Amino acid sequence: MLLLGIDIGTSSIKVSIVNANNSKSVASAHYPETEAAIISHHPGWAEQEPETWWEYFKLAFKKAASTGKFKASDIKAIGIAYQMHGLVIIDKNKKVLRPSIIWCDSRAVEIGNKAFHALGEEYSLIHYLNSPGNFTASKLAWVKANEPDVYGKVFKMMLPGDYLTMKLTGEITTSASALSEGILWDFQSETPAKRLMDQYGFTNEILPEIKPVFIEHGLVTKSASEELGLPMGIPVSYKAGDQPNNALSLNVLEPGEVAATAGTSGVIYAVSDQANYDPKSRVNSFAHVNHDSYQKRIGILLCINGTGIMNRWIRDIAGKDISYGEMNSQAESIPLGSEGLLVLPFGNGAERMLENKMPGAQFSNMQFTVHGPAHLFRAVQEGIACAFRYGLDIMRENGLQPSVIRAGKANMFLSELFTRLFVNLTSTPVELYENDGAVGAAIGAGIGAGVYSNSREAFASLKPIKEFTPESNLDAYEDLFLEWKQKLSESISE
């Protein structure tokens, strides 16, 4: 029996076909080969075309099928992971009305801030665990205020995974987890966020049907079956935002367990059984994939917008003809501290952990007679690792004390240098696993379709492939972080 996982990333759409018997990938593919475009008409804006996600998914699945490693007729269920916080709006004919305003778009910050004060900060934090901030609800409010003709045609608003489910099944559904990432869920009443929706002038009719994460969200239609070669009538039985899904893929489901990623953005994601919140909304709390009204499972998320995207940027600028492996090798030749060069990796929109400030990416203390490309490569990795430490300190202020962090051996965690920097700067061990979002989504589909009796069975074979522990003397790392933190403080206070 096979399971199909789909991961709607910012850079590409990835698919994995997983053998349900051992939870291992049979075939994987992604599209496009180069990173997908982000539309940015103004500084701080970021959009993508939902129709393009659908086309990329079809091409990625066709590419995987061309390997001949599986029969599409053996696929029994589909799971979807997706970039969080994106806004998709459709009309009554299920046609997309405008490009999706995606996660790193900053245009709605002030709209969210005004709603935060109007509702009352204490009320928002107790009921929604967050400020409305720059999340999906505020993005829709921006459309309502600035594109009234478009808003007047809106039938339903969705998250990216809801859109792909609609394309596959014709059904329009969502979940409490998805709504919570848009700040559209009230954790006190376990219902949609009525007062925030009233504040923005939304009605409940604009929301899709709300279902649990692990359940049938629709069956593949005849037209989708003919277009893709998938069996007609198989269910989409799981969908979740990429970070809750990454946590699921690492079997991070219970209180105290922590996951991390360092892809386009960087994330630390911890699970709690308490509906806690950060008073300044620097880290954010959402309903985890296994949250319900009887068993609270809150995902506490720290997000750094500029991690892998900055690592890619510096390679494009200073090392376009070399691989990431060669870039890491060159960075290894430079001592800790990059001979004084400091990097702030905040060049990808407003940073929530900096209270939605936009300091931009910065290089400090550069000396033309000292610093070359290898220093740039190392300083960027050090700057990103320092940003993780800064964010983890905020999470520690809010009661999180991780004993170990689980991460997939992917993206920046492919770099042993970066992994050691992360471990030593945070003083926290890291376990690396073979995992990816599409495989996690496939396993989620298996749980939702009842292929696995529970998550314990689904992840019975999950074992770490490598473990890193902090060095015995971390003084030099602490000195680097304090210097970096001082530079950040000067930058955001200007």
Image (cartoon, rainbow, N blue to C red):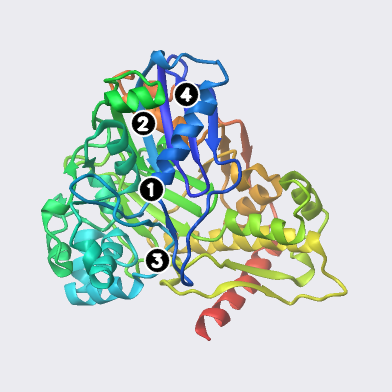
Task: Give the residue at mark 3.
Answer: 282
Q: Nearer the viewer, residue 391 or 376?
A: 376
Q: Which residue is mark 4?
A: 17
Residue 50 bears which disc, if any? 1
Residue 325, position in %: x, y? Answer: 74, 44
What residue is rendered at 68% in x and 45% in y? 415
Is 422 left, or right, of 93 in this rendering? Answer: right
Query: Is residue 478 placed above or below 186 in the rendered structure?
Result: below
CA distance separating discs 3 and 1: 29 Å
Q: CA distance from mark 2 to mark 1?
A: 18 Å
The mark that comes first in sequence, 4 or 3, is: 4
Q: Which residue is mark 2?
A: 79
Callout 1: few (<14), some (14-19), or many (20+) C-alpha neighbours within 10 Å?
many
Location of residue 2 in the rendering, given as x and y in whole percent from the top left corner:
42, 17
Local packing at callout 3 (Cα closer than 10 Å; few below 14, some 14-19, many 20+) is many
Q: Residue at x 22, y 66 (%)?
A: 149
Identified by mark 1, the residue type is: Pro
Query: Tag count in the figure?
Result: 4
